[in-house]
């Protein structure tokens, strides 16, 4: 299949390419677009044969529905997003699957298989598609972590609810949870594990070292070379830098 990726976060786009390669070496990524403007130019410049589009929904210059709606051909779309409330709209733009971030590799493989079957059978659009999309979202709606059980003393544990978490960080291979009260605790899990268990509406992994709670962010400020710095309310001296390629995503999340 010839595949177009629409994703404004470089690391997410690269992960999609790796997942595609894992699923099938024959899949060809024709291009990676990071904005609606690029997608419109891509399809306006020449006739492109695209079998499948894998698209994030929230881009730096608006929702991807804007550019997808301008494509004259009927191309199936696998939508990828951190939010579950666009499923109905996704149906209107040739959506055949709807994957919630962070994307699970097995779910991605199933979505790709669905796209391949779709191309082979060339099914007509039917009302059942919307129910399939909604079922896909419901299936992925995991129960997010609400609290952490932290070893406190030799024979005691402390419960910390997620509302009390300022951020989670890794340093020298040790993952620590920092509370809004200014305390920190060693967390017996990887940063990837913590990220996958927390509600993406509330928490985001803004770089390789930090997961932050939006409610604990005091402000964001510009930094060198297009980056931004996140300032935490209870930790003014902690320096959390967001790379240029992720700035738009973090800004949208903080503004959601």
Image (cartoon, grey):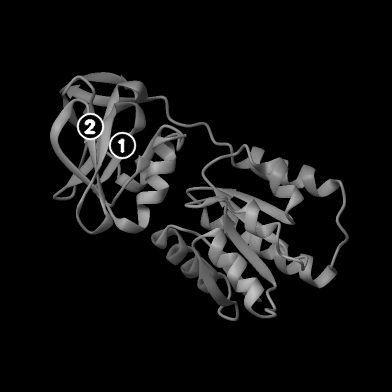
Residue wearing tag 2: 232
Q: Secondary structure at mark 2?
A: strand
Q: Residue at x 86, y 46 (%)?
A: 127
User: Distance of mark 1 from mark 2, alpha carbons?
Assistant: 8 Å
Q: Is residue 45 above or below residue 8?
A: below
Q: Nearer the viewer, residue 70 or 206?
A: 70
Q: Answer left or right for 255 relative to 103.
A: left
Give coordinates of residue 82: x percent, y percent: 51, 44
Q: Residue at x 58, y 75 (%)?
A: 24
Q: Residue at x 71, y 54 (%)?
A: 95
Give coordinates of residue 199: x percent, y percent: 45, 34
Q: Answer left or right for 111 relative to 12.
A: right
Q: Is residue 196 in view from this perspective? A: no
Binning the other alpha carbons within 10 Å of mark 2 as few (below 14), some (14 to 19) or many (20 upward) gives many
Q: Is residue 24 above or below residue 40?
A: below
Choose mark 1 or mark 2, whichever is in front.
Answer: 2
Which numbered disc covers residue 178? none
Give coordinates of residue 195: x percent, y percent: 38, 42
Q: Is residue 44 above or below residue 194?
A: below
In which quadrant of the rendered image does the N terminus lie?
A: bottom right
* Labelled pair 1, 2 in contact (Cβ < 8 Å): yes
Which numbered disc covers residue 212? 1
Binning the other alpha carbons within 10 Å of mark 1 as few (below 14), some (14 to 19) or many (20 upward) gives many
Q: Residue at x 58, y 58 (%)?
A: 55
Give coordinates of residue 87: x percent, y percent: 68, 42
Q: Is residue 198 in view from this perspective? A: yes
Q: Nearer the viewer, residue 6 or 164?
A: 6
Q: Is residue 119 above or below residue 200?
A: below
Q: Answer left or right for 12 relative to 180.
A: right
First in sequence: mark 1 vs mark 2 = 1
Count of numbered labels shown in the rendering: 2
């Amino acid at each position: 299949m010839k595949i177009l990726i629409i994703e404004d976060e470089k690391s997410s786009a690269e992960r999609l390419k790796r997942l595609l390669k894992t699923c099938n070496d024959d899949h060809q990524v024709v291009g990676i677009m990071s904005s609606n403007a690029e997608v419109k130019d891509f399809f306006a410049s020449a006739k492109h044969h695209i079998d499948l589009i894998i698209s994030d929904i929230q881009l730096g210059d608006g929702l991807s529905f804007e550019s997808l709606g301008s494509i004259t051909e009927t191309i199936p779309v696998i939508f990828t997003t951190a939010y579950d409330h666009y499923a109905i709209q996704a149906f209107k733009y040739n959506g055949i699957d709807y994957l919630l971030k962070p994307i699970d590799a097995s779910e991605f493989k199933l979505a790709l298989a669905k796209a391949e079957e779709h191309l082979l059978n060339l099914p007509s659009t039917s009302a059942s598609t919307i129910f399939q999309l909604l079922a896909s979202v419901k299936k992925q709606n995991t129960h997010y972590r609400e609290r952490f059980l932290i070893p406190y003393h030799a024979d005691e544990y402390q419960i910390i609810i997620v509302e009390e978490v300022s951020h989670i960080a890794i340093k020298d291979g040790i993952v620590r949870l920092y509370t809004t009260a200014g305390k920190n605790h060693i967390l017996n899990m990887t940063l990837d594990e913590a990220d996958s268990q927390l509600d993406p509406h509330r928490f985001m992994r803004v770089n390789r070292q930090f997961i932050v709670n939006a409610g604990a962010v005091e402000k964001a400020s510009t930094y060198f070379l297009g980056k931004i710095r996140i300032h935490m309310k209870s930790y003014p001296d902690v320096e959390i830098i967001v790379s240029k390629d992720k700035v738009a995503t973090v800004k949208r999340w903080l503004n959601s």
